[in-house]
Amino acid sequence: MATRTTDTDWERRPTAMSDVLIELRAAILRGEYAPRQRLIESDLVEQYDTSRFVLRNVFTRLANEGLLELQPNRGARVREITVAEAIEITEIRRAVEGFVAARAAERITDEEVVDVQALGAEMASAVEHADMVLYSELNARLHGKVRSIAGHSSATRILEQLNGQMVRHQFRLSLVPGRPSVSLPEHLAIVDALCSRDPDRAERAMRVHLTSVLDALAAFTPPTS
């Protein structure tokens, strides 16, 4: 018979909070919970075999990351990121990811060149077969690979938090008719610059791509009268 988790078990299971944090964050980013959906503590305590103490600490962490809103006497709900916020986030990403791309081009190894080229080929294939769900996933993987190659922990921490808030808008963009035919060449330009070990070109390519994302997001915003 399963043993019930108590509010003091977190002291004996130091990884419990990190495990729940990782799993709940991933579920939110996958879209398992809709924007503004309230999270039911009792259901999640049972689902993750944890305690309310641990879960509330996880809620606080995810609220700090911008994924949840904590409401007095009502618990937590999934935060809805507006288009205006998404534009601001992308403006920050453009500056930081440009730097990261340049650094990655300086540090990339021969083995990583092969991996990045393979990602580019997979993205091209996904667009050719109109598999936009896969293309969106590969898009995220490529940006993650650039961060990994760059090896700048502070930039990575900033970008992962920002990207977590952007995930729904990024997926929405990938479904806009004609958008992949614009973004694919931009991504392939990033791939080519990285693999050529050209930091200046890598930074420009990343900034061009994210400027294009800004333009696409702005198209979601109704004009003011």
Image (cartoon, rainbow, N blue to C red):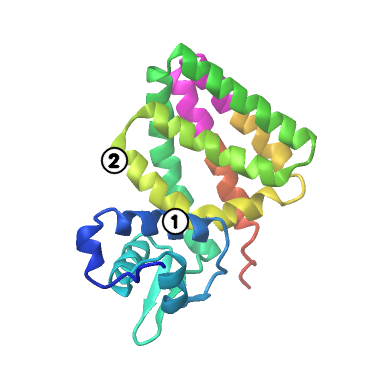
Depth order, front residue of 17/161: 17
* Spatial separation of the CA atoms under disc 1 and disc 2: 23 Å
Circle 2 — which element? Answer: helix
Depth order, front residue of 147/221: 147
User: Whole-percent x and y of residue 68?
Assistant: 42, 68
Depth order, front residue of 62/81: 62
Q: Residue furthest right?
A: 129
Predominant secondary structure, magenta span: helix
Which mark, by number, is residue 23? 1
- Three-letter amino acid code at the position of disc 2: Ser
Assess disc 1: are there few (<14), some (14-19) or many (≥20) residues with their C-alpha within 10 Å of its C-alpha. few
> Can you say which quadrant of the picture contains the N terminus?
bottom left
- Determine the image quadrant of residue 66: bottom left
User: Whole-percent x and y of residue 94?
Assistant: 45, 42
Which mark, by number, is residue 173? none
Residue at coordinates 61% horizontally, 63% vertically from top-left? 221
**Residue 106 visible to an observer of this rendering:** yes
In the rendered view, does 187 fall on the left or right side of 109? right
With respect to residue 105, does 23 lie above or below? below
Residue occupied by mark 2 = 154
Whether 193 is among the magenta residues is yes
User: Whole-percent x and y of residue 77?
Assistant: 46, 74
User: Whole-percent x and y of residue 53?
Assistant: 28, 72
With respect to residue 116, does 183 lie above or below? below
> Magenta segment, which residues?
189-206
Assess disc 2: are there few (<14), some (14-19) or many (≥20) residues with their C-alpha within 10 Å of its C-alpha. few
